Amino acid sequence: MSDAAAGAPLVELRGVNKHFGDLHVLRDINLSVDRGEVVVVIGPSGSGKSTLCRTINRLETIDAGTIRLDGQPLPAEGRALARLRADVGMVFQAFNLFAHKSVLQNVTLGPTRAKGVRKSEAEKLAMELLDRVGVADQAAKLPAQLSGGQQQRVAIARALAMKPKVMLFDEPTSALDPEMIKEVLDVMIDLAKDGMTMMVITHEMGFARRAANRVIFMDAGSIVEEATPEEFFTNARSDRARDFLSKIL
Ligand code: ADP
Ligand code: MG
């Protein structure tokens, strides 16, 4: 962290707007995430949650507003953009592992290719991370030989191998069979307890209750409500949030 950034939120969005053609997908988004904070983003399908996440590592550009990471505006291109991508770990609904690489290689590739870490060092870190997410014994296998829950935990280890400043999770358990959801959420809860800054798109109320500092409810491209998990799930203020909760709970 730079001295200048010490007092700033780790992630800060100000007046962010984004269109896809005529569709106004992000509307005047203001959002700060502090170091060590866990923010859960919830809302109906199509409300802009994934797009919001993707703007933070610049997988999507924005039309207006500013996004800062660690006090610095997001870089547009080049080496600075590669560094940003390393700083912002991302875990998707579909695990997106490299199918023809071993579990171990999936975790070492980023550090060796993008950060120039020596292979032996990358492997040592990878084994530590695989152990942390509970799949060290699967290191030599191909992703397809693992269960969905194990693959998603590998995806988390892979993101952590880049030593990100913040981890973004986009519905990390929604493609999983019910019995595998907990093993992934438990890894995420451990990460949160360990002080990782996280933004998590999920409808898993149990996770929000146990790990989130704040819940953000989005609808039609806007942040409609921001509350503690307890407040949000027991006493949502807006009709739109109450209507949404009545459908998922
Ligand atoms: P959520 O994650 O909340 O379901 P998204 O951010 O994926 O919402 O999508 C918000 C809206 O933007 C949806 O209407 C979706 O169809 C649209 N959208 C998302 N990505 C694109 C894209 N690349 N091009 C055009 N429209 C898109
Ligand atoms: Mg989405």
Image (cartoon, rainbow, N blue to C red):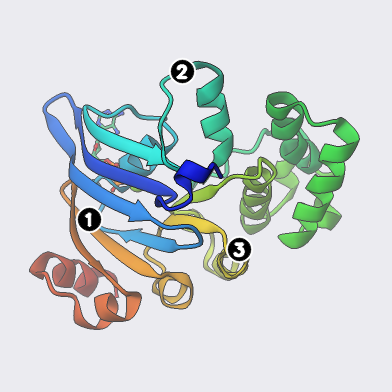
Q: Measured from the top left, where is residue 120 in percent x and y?
A: 90, 36
Instruction: From the viewer's side, name the closer residue of 69 and 27.
Output: 69
**Residue type (three-letter) at the residue carrying disc 2:** Glu
Foreground disc of the pair 3, 1: 3
Q: CA distance from mark 2 to mark 1?
A: 29 Å
Residue furthest to the top in view is 78
Residue that badge 1 annotates: 218
Task: Label 3: state its secondary structure.
Answer: helix
**Residue type (three-letter) at the residue carrying disc 1:** Met
Can residue 101 be seen? yes
Q: Is mark 2 within 8 Å of ligand 1?
A: no
Q: CA distance from mark 2 to mark 3?
A: 30 Å
Q: Is mark 3 within 8 Å of ligand 2?
A: no
Q: Measured from the top left, where is residue 226 in percent x and y?
A: 24, 65
Residue that badge 2 annotates: 77
Identify the residue at horizontal 78%, vertical 36% (top origin).
105
Q: Measured from the top left, where is residue 64 in percent x and y?
A: 20, 30
Task: Label 2: state its secondary structure.
Answer: loop
* Quadrant of the rendered image holding ligand 1: top left
> Quick one: label 3 or label 1, which is nearer the N terminus?
3
Q: Is mark 1 within 8 Å of ligand 1?
A: yes
Q: For the C terminus, give its image quadrant.
A: bottom left
10 Å crowding of disc 3: few (<14), some (14-19), many (20+): many
Residue that badge 3 annotates: 191
**Residue type (three-letter) at the residue carrying disc 3:** Leu
Foreground disc of the pair 2, 1: 2
